[in-house]
Image: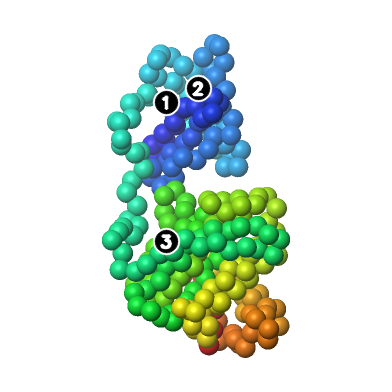
């Protein structure tokens, strides 16, 4: 299984990242990188119990050993030149590409503590009003596409739903993408409150059908969606009177359905209202 290390600089500081193409991992940050004057090289990634210790033999060869979870194997590094304009990452299948048969708006939502969150709202062709869904991201700082290693699942979901006539709102988390604030300050309750504000924005739009608006959450976002559905009538006011939008169908899916009907491990929640 090949492993690729990239040595470079950012803001005048040395940086090292690791790729494991066979596992679909690219740009994984190396927390500790040290090269001594005698040519000894040490690379460490504590969260995956990874350590590489090598000896620089020439300008193009480092001989060493990789240790992970108590097991050690020889691993020699050979210098290769990256072709200009060519990425080491593969083309990700399924990423939507323009032109799109729908509109996309850049939107801004203000949280209860005054933080500006940015997001994208995709709207089907026509005047509406349209059924809609708010996508709620999982734990960790996520952008509006929930991008990880160049996969953009929320972008893919938004594209598919909007092509089917459903408006989709997806947001950058606090301190991520174009949103203000700091993600380090975000608790589960604060993330839930931010989702409330995004949903409130969606339901106030005249081109959105209030009675046909729902939530779709991934991982922690699924927890937020279920909590929101459980207290729908009592938690939020959309205008002067309490919202008269009782929770409808609630579906818990452990990952996307596959052709053979099995459910890969993960958690997604869908709340259909109306």
Residue 155 vs 201, above or below: the answer is: above
Callout 3 secondary element: helix
Residue 180 left/right relative to 22:
right
Q: Which of these two is toward me, 258 or 208?
A: 208
Q: State the CA–CA distance, disc 1 to disc 3.
A: 39 Å
Residue at 54% across, 11% down: 38
The image quadrant that residue 79 belongs to is top left
Residue at 57% across, 36% down: 45
- Identify the residue position indicated by label 1 in the image: 76
- Give the position of the N terminus as an image quadrant: top left
Q: Which of these two is toward me, 12 or 33?
A: 12
Residue 161 left/right relative to 179:
left
Q: Which of these two is toward me, 230 or 22?
A: 230
Residue 53 left/right relative to 90:
right
Q: Which mark is residue 155?
A: 3
The answer to the question of whether label 2 and label 1 lie on touching residues, with beta carbons closer than 8 A, is yes
Residue 145 left/right relative to 248:
left
């Amino acid at each position: 299984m090949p492993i690729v290390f990239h040595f470079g600089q950012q803001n005048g500081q040395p940086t090292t990242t690791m790729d494991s193409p066979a596992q679909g991992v690219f740009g994984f940050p190396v927390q500790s990188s040290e090269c001594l004057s005698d040519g000894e090289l040490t690379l460490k990634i504590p969260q995956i119990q990874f350590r590489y210790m090598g000896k620089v033999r020439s300008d193009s060869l480092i001989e060493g050993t990789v240790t992970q979870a108590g097991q050690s194997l020889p691993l020699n590094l050979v210098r290769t030149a990256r072709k200009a304009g060519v990425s080491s990452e593969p083309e990700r299948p399924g990423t939507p590409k323009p032109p799109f048969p729908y509109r996309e708006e850049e939107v801004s939502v203000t949280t209860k503590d005054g933080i500006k969150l940015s997001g994208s709202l995709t709207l089907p062709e026509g005047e509406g009003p349209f059924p809609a869904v708010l996508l709620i991201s999982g734990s960790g700082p996520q952008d509006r596409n929930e991008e990880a290693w160049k996969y953009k699942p929320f972008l893919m979901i938004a594209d598919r739903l909007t092509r089917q006539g459903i408006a989709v709102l997806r947001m950058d988390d606090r301190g991520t993408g174009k949103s203000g604030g700091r993600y380090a300050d975000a608790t589960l309750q604060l993330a839930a409150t931010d989702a409330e504000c995004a949903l409130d924005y969606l339901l106030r739009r005249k081109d959105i059908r209030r009675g046909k608006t729902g939530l779709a959450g991934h991982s922690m976002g699924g927890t937020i969606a279920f909590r929101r559905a459980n207290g729908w009538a009592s938690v939020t006011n959309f205008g002067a009177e309490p919202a008269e939008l009782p929770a409808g169908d609630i579906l818990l899916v452990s990952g996307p359905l596959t052709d053979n009907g099995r459910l890969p491990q993960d958690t997604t929640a869908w709340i259909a209202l109306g």
